[in-house]
Image (cartoon, coloured by chain):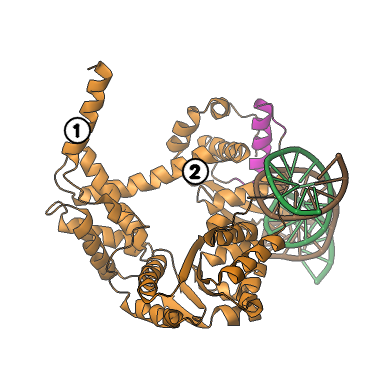
Chain colours: A orange, B green, C brown
Amino acid sequence: MTIQNDILDNIFDNYLQLSTIFKNREALRSDYIPDYLPHRDEQIKRIASILAPILSGSRGSNILIYGKTGTGKTAVVRYVLKRLFEKAKEEGVFVKTCYINCRLAGTDYRVLAKLCESINIKVPFTGLATGEVFDRFKNGLEINDFMLIIVLDEIDALVKEVGDTLLYELTRINEGLDNGHTSLIGVSNDLYFKEFLDARVLSSLSEEEVIFRPYLANELYDILLERAKTSFNNDVLVEGALHLCSAFAAAEHGDARRALDLLRVAGELAERKRATIVSEDYIRQAKEKIEKDRVVEVLKTLPLHSKIVLCSTYHFKKANQKIINTGDVYEVYKELCEVLNLEPLTQRRVSSLINELDTLGILKTKLVSLGRYGRTKRIILNLPMSTLNDVYSKQIRISKIINHSIRYRND
DNA sequence: TGTCCACTGGAACGTACGGCTT
DNA sequence: AAGCCGTACGTTCCAGTGGACA
């Protein structure tokens, strides 16, 4: 037995002893499909009855599903499809399902590549024309006589990014098929996403519509309670903790995913502290941890020039300069590039980077008009300076510009 | 009331890259 | 090998603009 072995043994033993909190941690992950989804009976029934004709071999209507993040859309769809799939198998009907997150896929090509993959057609990740991939997909359906249910999650993200060309093709695909057919289920986080769609696409895609309202605090509580039963050991969770958790999540547009994350992280924190119960306090700590972890992760993985832009705003905040605009940020950005021996990007590009950082919630920007003094963006660093300092001091290249003293003055 | 600032943000285009088909 | 494709990341160009100021 080596010393290292001892240490590892210790860690693992400790872990096993520590696992007095969770019964099944996985049940708190957002991709877990529970056996019961509280407060979604209506939607489950609706979607199931729309898709039911598939069991008799005919095509189900296309469905468009709306609702904010964490309202159970994905869970309900996956739940219904899972049951449908099992039922179809019993009945000897051959059904295939394909779930695609459009935001993660990002482009028409990659969505199509995933569709091909789901019917066992191998497609290279680049090199082919999009039309070619579409043809292969269509042929695959035809030859194999597949009944394919396609779930396009976060469909709004794709349409906003690259338009609705692909959706148009997909909604028409059945027209050109003698064998095999598809049903589309579009899932959108954006209630106004319809406006981005061509009328023909819209009418075809939204043959049926299902809306998911945000959960109320008491509904979130029921959901958490249900999940807690399967995930936590008995008597571990303080009732007040559940209430606090649902209250936090209800304040953030009734996002159940957030609530479940909160509960899981709180449990993990308690576990690490060797606590035997998960109290309200752990929920509060979890809330802070989740936010901080998110920010740190974003800071670390940002492209180099975005980091420099961020450091530029950091220097203004450090110098107590509250009001800064794009021009100021760009001047300091150029100065920092010089320090790093880098060719600076154009102001137009930096302007886009600032917008991206705004979307990530790291910067806060506001378009203002200063009359005679032009139009620009007010920019505020939207995170604690210490967080940025901690993360970037450890990165060799960026640490050089963190402590650089700035020449530029904007007064 | 018109001017004009300091940008914004859309659009078109360029370049490099990996990888396909023929 | 030639010619094409999608993707990522960038540049260049430029019309548009809200409102302070003369």
Instruction: Give residue A174's position: percent from left, percent from top.
Output: 61, 77
Magenta residue check for A331 = yes
Query: Which kind of residue does numbered mark 1 sit on?
Result: Asn
- The chain to which mark 1 is attached is A
Disc 2 or disc 1, which is closer to the eye?
1
Instruction: Give residue B13's position: percent from left, percent from top.
Output: 84, 52
- The residue depicted at 63 percent of the width and 50 percent of the height is A125
Question: Looking at the picture, does residue B15 appear above or below residue A117?
Answer: above
Q: Tell me, for residue A32, which label it has, or none.
A: none
Find disc 2 in the rendering and name its residue. Answer: A298
Q: Which residues are magenta?
A: A324-343
Instruction: Give residue A63's position: percent from left, percent from top.
Output: 50, 77
Q: Secondary structure at mark 1?
A: helix
**How many numbered discs?**
2
Find disc 1 in the rendering and name its residue. Answer: A14
Tell me the quadrant of the picture where the N terminus of chain A can be found: top left
- The chain to which mark 2 is attached is A
Res. A28 in view: yes
